[in-house]
Image (cartoon, rainbow, N blue to C red):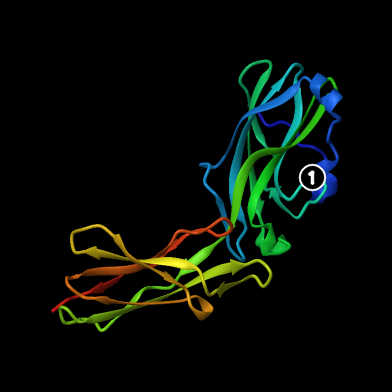
Amino acid sequence: MRIRSFVGALCGAVALSALVIPAAQAEENPITFSSITIDSGKPLVVGTVAPKQFLVHYTVNHTHKLYSSEASLYAGGLDTWSGEARPVSSPSCQDLSATVTRCAQKLAIDPKTLVGNGVAGTWHLYLQAADADDNVVGKGGLYPTKVLRASTMAKTDADPEPVVKGKTLTVTGKLTQADWNTHKYVGQAGKSAVLQFRPDGGSYATVKTVKTGSGGALKATVTANTDGAWRWYYAGDSTTGGATAVGAAVVVK
C-alpha cells in the first residue's frame, strides 16, 4: 500500500525538529522504528552537480493503524541543521501485519544545496510517523551514515612506452575531489595515493605510496622489469570517497 506522507516536506532544522517529542511522552508513544537500512550500507558519495539518490528501508511498529510516515537524512544536529537529503517521492509501505509496516522511500542529496565541504562526514536519519489514533512520533539520530565528497582519478600515464627492461619508467596521474563550495572538482596537495602494478595475467598489487603535489598531481619513478599495467588508487578518507584510475599498459622490451 502507499500511505499518506506528512503535509509538507522536511525543510531544514525547523522541520526536522518540529515533531521532536518530550522524553516522557515518547516513552508512552505506541510507535517505534526498527530494521533500518540505507542502500547497501556503504557511504553515500556525492559529486558537484547531479543529486545522489538512494533508498531508505525501515519498519514502523504501531498499535493503531498507521496513517503516515516519512524519512529524511540530515547533517549536524536537530537544532544545528547544515545539510539534508530530501524526499524524491512519498514512501511506499506494505503492512506485514496489523501492527507492523515495512516502508521504502527514495531520498536525494543535491550538492547545490549543501553549505560547504564541512558537512561531509557522518549524517543521521530522521523518521516520523503518525497513526489513526493521533499518536505522532519524530525521531532523529538514527542510523549513522557517511556522506562523502566524490573523488576522481585522471587516466594513468606511463612514459616512455615501450620501455627497455631495467630502465626507469615515470608514472603520472591526478587526483581531484568534489568541492561543495565551488561545485567543481579541485586538486589538493598532501593526499596519500598508491601506485599499483598488474603483470600480464596477474592482479594489481601496491608498489609504493605517494603524496599528491600541487593541484593533486601524482608522480613516481619505478624500474621496468616486465610487461603489465600501472594505475593510481586512492582509498578515500573520513570525508572523501575513493577513486581508481584507468591503468596504463606498458610493454617492456
Residue 106 higher or lower than 183, as above or below: above
Location of residue 123 in the rendering, given as x and y in whole percent from the top left corner: 66, 48
Residue at 64%, 70% in the rendered image = 183
Location of residue 251 in the rendering, given as x and y in whole percent from the top left corner: 18, 75
Location of residue 145 in the rendering, given as x and y in whole percent from the top left corner: 61, 45
Horizontally, residue 101 falls left or right of residue 16, namely: left
Horizontally, residue 25 falls left or right of residue 172, namely: right
**Residue lying farthest left?**
253
Residue at 59%, 49% in the rendered image = 146
| SS at badge 1 | loop
Residue 67 higher or lower than 197, as above or below: above
Residue type for callout 1: Leu
Horizontally, residue 187 falls left or right of residue 153, namely: right
Q: Closer to the camera, 14 or 225?
A: 225
**Residue lying farthest bottom?**
160
- Label 1 crowd bin: few (<14), some (14–19), many (20+), radius 10 Å: many
Q: In this orientation, does residue 89 appear?
A: no
Location of residue 177 in the rendering, given as x and y in whole percent from the top left corner: 55, 68
Residue 125 placement: quadrant:
top right
Q: In this orientation, does residue 216 appear?
A: yes
Q: Quadrant of the N terminus?
A: top right
Residue at 25%, 63% in the rendered image = 198
Total marks in image: 1
Residue at 57%, 72% in the rendered image = 185
Q: Name the residue under label 1.
A: 78
Residue 68 placement: quadrant:
top right
Residue 197 placement: quadrant:
bottom left
Q: Quadrant of the C terminus?
A: bottom left
